[in-house]
Structures are given as C-alpha cells and as structure tokens.
Amino acid sequence: MRVAILGASGRTGGVLVEQALERGHEVVALVRTPARVAVPVPGRTEIRKADVTVPRGFPDLADVDVVVSAIGIGKGDGPGALVAGAKALAAAGVRTVWLGALGSGVSSRSGGLIYAGVMRLFVGAELAEKAEADRIALDAGATVFHAPDVTDGPLSPTRRTVPLAELRRPLLPPRISRATLASLLLDEAETGRAGSGILVPLG
Ligand SMILES: NC(=O)c1ccc[n+]([C@@H]2O[C@H](COP(=O)([O-])OP(=O)(O)OC[C@H]3O[C@@H](n4cnc5c(N)ncnc54)[C@H](OP(=O)(O)O)[C@@H]3O)[C@@H](O)[C@H]2O)c1
C-alpha cells in the first residue's frame, strides 16, 4: 500500500514510518520541515512538504491509499495544528486513521479518575482542540484512535483495539508503548475499513 504519515518527523510518526517500511509499504512522509526527516528507504519513501496551517500549500494525496495522522502541537507552537490537520485531511478526501488521546472529548472519563486528573493537569490547554479535531475527523469518515499515555518499550504481544464504548474503565492510568501504538494504527490502516468510530489501543 501507499501510506502517508502526517507528522512523520514526530516521535510517533517516526516509528510509524519505520514500521510501515518494515511491512513493505511505500511511505509518503508529510512534514512541515522536510530537512527533519531522513529518507530511510530510497525509492520507497517520499517526503512531501505539508504545513497544515497553510492549507493552500497542502499536497495532493490522490495517489495514497490511506493517511495515518500522528500530528501533535509542537513545543513553542500555539494552538491550531490539530484542527488545521483534521481539516486538511478532510478536504483531501483520503481514508484516514487519526491519532487522538484517551481522556479528551468523549473519552474524558474513560481512562479512570486518576488518569482524568493527570490529563487535566498536563494536557488541559489542548483538550478542547483535541475534541474539536476528533469531531472534524469523525465527520469526515476517519477512524480515530484514543491512545492512553505513550511510553518507550517493546511491541506488546497482547496488543488489541477496543471500541471506546466497550472499554472497561481502568483503576490505574493506562499506558501503551509507542511501538505497540504504531503497530495498531498500521493494522487499522491496512484493513481498508473507513469510519470505525473511536478505538482505544491497548497492550
Ligand atoms: N505522547 C503521548 O503520551 C500521547 C498519548 C496519547 C495521544 N498522543 C497524541 O499523539 C499525537 C502525536 O504525539 P507525539 O508525541 O508523537 O508528538 P510529537 O513528537 O510532538 O510530533 C508532532 C508532529 O506533528 C508535527 N506538526 C506540528 N505542527 C505541524 C504543522 N503545522 N504542520 C505539519 N506538521 C506539524 C510535528 O512536526 P515538526 O517536527 O515540524 O515539529 C511532528 O512531526 C499527538 O496528537 C498526541 O496528542 C500522545
């Protein structure tokens, strides 16, 4: 498949690029600063400049099968990248798997009380934007992941996704390794399905 990764220069985006190439896909890395991304496999990695806050310059994605978004609000940036990113992908009309956060919007209480408190404390200022970006992505037919706290660590052998409505609220704050999260995002991208609602990656 031809898989575009939005936010390919980020921590999760970088792992997505690596894993997509390992799976044999062609990768289109969508980044606002092309110099920040190496071309890991020449011939199978293409870098396209894409700053979501400049919609007129957003690249055409008619040649990709699916986009996985791992865009985030950069340190030192003001708000807006998440909503702008969701709008850019909605306008591009391409099948999308969108990464959001457990503990935001409709899942604000789903990670448990301690997790909700931690989210309010550390992510509070971004919560409203995350919820709005999710709504735009869902309305455009995307599948949205609500990932818990992301850590370093190996691929979990028990990795799975559950629909948000079926998540049992945990007592302790849930976590997932970046490798596991990236793998589940790509699994979803490979299904060819669109619009699976909100899924929670676990592992
Ligand atoms: N970290 C966690 O524990 C956690 C948990 C749950 C969900 N999430 C969600 O996962 C997503 C990614 O997290 P992360 O930790 O991988 O983020 P990250 O390392 O900060 O990467 C963010 C990416 O977004 C890109 N970006 C920012 N503004 C942009 C713009 N205007 N146009 C195009 N690209 C832009 C950045 O590009 P530059 O390199 O140019 O800055 C970078 O590639 C976030 O939405 C976050 O909320 C994270």
Image (cartoon, helix red, strand yellow):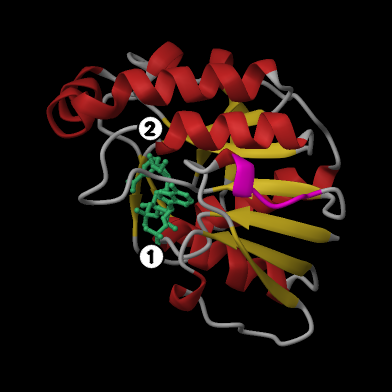
Relative horizontal placement of residue 194, taking residue 199 as reference (left or right): right
Q: Residues within 10 Å of mark 2 (few under 14, many from 20)?
A: some
Type of secondary structure dominating the magenta stretch: loop
Residue under label 1, please give it. Answer: 153
Say which residue appears at 82% left-offset and 61% top-offset. 2
Mark 1: amino acid: Gly
The part of the chain drawn in magenta is 56-61
Relative horizontal placement of residue 83, taking residue 93 as reference (left or right): left
**Residue 130 placed where, x, y %?**
40, 26
Answer yes or no: is residue 168 visible: no
Location of residue 83 with respect to 40 vertically, above or below: above
Q: Quadrant of residue 143?
A: top right
Respond yes or no on whether mark 2 lies under 8 Å from ligand 1.
Answer: yes
Q: Quadrant of residue 112?
A: top left
Residue under label 2, please give it. Answer: 80
- Split into 4 quadrants, where in the image is the N terminus? bottom right
* Nearer to the camera, 111 or 41: 41
Say which residue appears at 42% left-offset and 38% top-offset. 81
Q: Secondary structure at mark 2?
A: loop
Q: Earlier in the sequence, mark 1 or mark 2?
A: 2
Respond yes or no on whether mark 1 lies under 8 Å from ligand 1.
Answer: no
Relative horizontal placement of residue 139, taking residue 145 as reference (left or right): right
**Residue 19 placed where, x, y %?**
63, 68
Please identify, in this view, whether the residue under mark 1 or under mark 2 is nearer the observer: 2
**Residue 191 placed where, x, y %?**
83, 43
Is 192 part of what is drawn in magenta?
no
Answer yes or no: is residue 148 visible: yes
Say which residue appears at 71% left-offset and 21% top-offset. 140
